[in-house]
Image: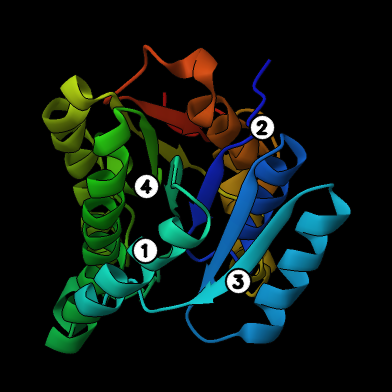
Amino acid sequence: MFRLDGKVALVTGGSRGIGRGICVALARAGAKVIVNYAGNEAAAVETLELVRAAGGEGEIARFDVSDAAAVDKAIPELAKRHDGLHILVNNAGIAIDQLLLRVKPEQLERTMSVNVGGALWCSKAAIKIMMRKRTGRVINLSSVVGETGNKGQVVYGASKAAIIGLTKTLAREYASRGVTVNCIAPGFIETDMTAELSDKVKEQAIAETPLGRMGTPEDIAAAVLYLASDEAGFVTGHTIRVNGGMHI
């Protein structure tokens, strides 16, 4: 079950953290994995090495997901080179934490451009390719914060809530073309980003998680693997909460 042999997958923001875990899981399941990154080539190369160590094939691809023109150029070229694109994982994202009264226009614009615009532009380019073959999987990464809200994360929370709305709308638009669009809302996950948080913040987050621990990139990757598989062919427009019970 959940094999992806012969499938080509593009993971945005795949060089580190959750993205890296997703790349490795997809490779282990047989997919050819394209690791997108914006600037850290060394990290992307490291992820590609892990993909190959897992028995997979792939390449790295540098482009900024918030740049519509760059996306429109890169994704068709990648699909042509690999004879198709079957899976898109919109994982790339940024978090600029700030209370509402301190939010600056450029912080809102940058967050929305990457988190929402990136998912939209990549989906647009990928779905154009998928719908021709009447099959495809688009998987978006939201956050528990997009469902519950969180103090000091008004911009990030708004962007991740928008991802859920984007998912539902695209699911309705392209179901008739054989393309499913789903979403995953992670809870508190062990990554480079969360490693920088204070012990007090980590302890509070764990205390608010009924399962009593932080999640791992592998926890998220397992959900991605399911949604990318043929076994999830009748699932679309859905948000899977992988949050340890933080939000039910």
Residue 45, quarter of the rendered image: bottom right
In the picture, the disc for residue 142 is 4
Could you tell whether 37 is left or right of 162 in the image? right
Q: For this rendering, which residue is in front, 151 or 62?
A: 62
Residue 136 x/y as whole percent:
37, 33
Give the SS element for disc 1: helix
Secondary structure type for disc 2? loop
Of labels 2 and 3, earlier in sequence is: 2
Separation of marks 1 and 2 at Cα, in angstroms: 21 Å
Q: Nearer the viewer, mark 2 or mark 4?
A: 2
Residue 62 visible here: yes
Image position of 48 with respect to 4: above or below: below
Residue 215 seen: no
Query: In which quadrant is the N terminus drawn?
Result: top right
Read off the residue under disc 2.
5
Q: Is residue 2 above or below residue 87?
A: above
Above or below: residue 97 compared with residue 35 = below
Extreme residue toward the right, this view: 53
At 77% from the left and 73% from the top, the residue drawn is 46
Which residue corresponds to mark 1? 75
**Spatial distance from mark 4 to mark 1, Cα to Cα?**
22 Å
Comparing 194 with 220, the one in front is: 220
Disc on the earlier residue, 1 or 2: 2
* Residues at marks 1 and 2 touching, judged by CB atoms closer than 8 Å: no
Residue 74 picture location, percent across and down:
37, 71
Dot 1: few (<14), some (14–19), or many (≥20) neighbours within 10 Å? many
- Pointer 3 residue: 60
Q: Which mark is residue 50?
A: none
